[in-house]
Image: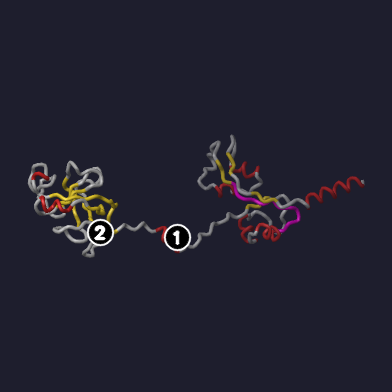
Amino acid sequence: MKKSILTGLLTLTACMGTAASASASEAYTVKENDTLWKVEKNHKLPFAAVQKMNPAIDPKNLHIGTKLRMPETYTVVEGESLQDISKKVNIPVKELQSTNPNVNSSNIQGGTVLVLPQKTKVAKPKTKMDNTSTKAPSTPVVKTVDGKKLTYKRTLSSRATAYSAAPEENGGYTGIDYYGNELKVGTIAVDPDVIPLGSKVYITGYSFPGLPEGGMVAQATDIGGAIKNNRIDIFVPGSPAHVNKFGVQNVKIYVLK
């Protein structure tokens, strides 16, 4: 008789001393002959708890190998009240009640599995830096000598020479570019592999009589046998002797949009 009483006391003490069991949500892999009801029963979950976590799943057509999201749960320890559990899991009593409507909150049995409300991520207010990062990157702009703002795609640091309209400087033709247009201030010869023919550019860094001071808009409509890589040739009105004084100058080229 004493042995039976002692055994009973030890069993009760073990139950009372069991630590509260909170289970984090884990994925469950559907097996052969599984149903949502069977999965919920095996995990001691209330009806439709798994379906709420997996709204896209067809409960009548589960596929083997499908990963099911499982709710986060709490296993009640004998003698605990809903208020005790609320403090332990840091969730208001009303939320626990609404998530587990079939549980008698005034008489919770030990071993009962409670579904914990899903934690909602609170969106952080955007900081000034966040707002800046969401804006589209600004288009680069170059300001011309007359105050205009031109958008450009890229820049090149080039070596520039000059040429005249003389036929000996134009492959035997007098005063025309690659397309047959008359040479004029703003015509440049380029390497098409670097600056595609037809491109409009803004050039700065040169200095020579007969060319706009400070910078000019030009168009790549000519080519030349010696014009390779980043080198360009700028048309300048005048005799070959005059144009030859241009020499070689370092310029910056803005390839415009």
- Across and down, in percent, residue 78 comes to 75, 53
Q: Residue at x 20, y 58 (%)?
A: 207
Write down the quadrant of residue 29 in the picture: top right
Part of the protein shown in magenta:
70-81
| Mark 2 residue element | strand
Q: Is residue 76 magenta?
A: yes
Mark before the other along the chain sequence, 1 or 2: 1
Q: Which mark is residue 170?
A: none
Mark 1 neighbour density, 10 Å: few (under 14) some (14–19) many (20 or more): few
Tell me which secondary structure the magenta stretch mostly adopts: loop
| Mark 1 residue element | helix
Q: In the visual, does 162 lie left or right of 254? A: left
Q: Amino acid at mark 1?
A: Asp
- Name the one closer to the observer, 119 or 106: 119
Q: Is residue 148 magenta?
A: no
- Name the one closer to the observer, 92 or 134: 134
- Across and down, in percent, residue 247 comes to 18, 51
Q: Residue at x 20, y 44 (%)?
A: 227
Tag 2 residue = 150
Dot in front, 1 or 2: 2
Q: In the visual, does 181 lie left or right of 52? A: left
Q: In the visual, does 187 lie left or right of 25? A: left
Tag 1 residue = 130
Instruction: Give the answer, above or below, for where 42 lies relative to 110.
Output: above
- CB contact under 8 Å: marks 1 and 2: no
Q: Amino acid at mark 2?
A: Leu
- Across and down, in percent, residue 96 comes to 63, 57
Instruction: Give the answer, above or below, for where 65 lies relative to 81.
Output: above
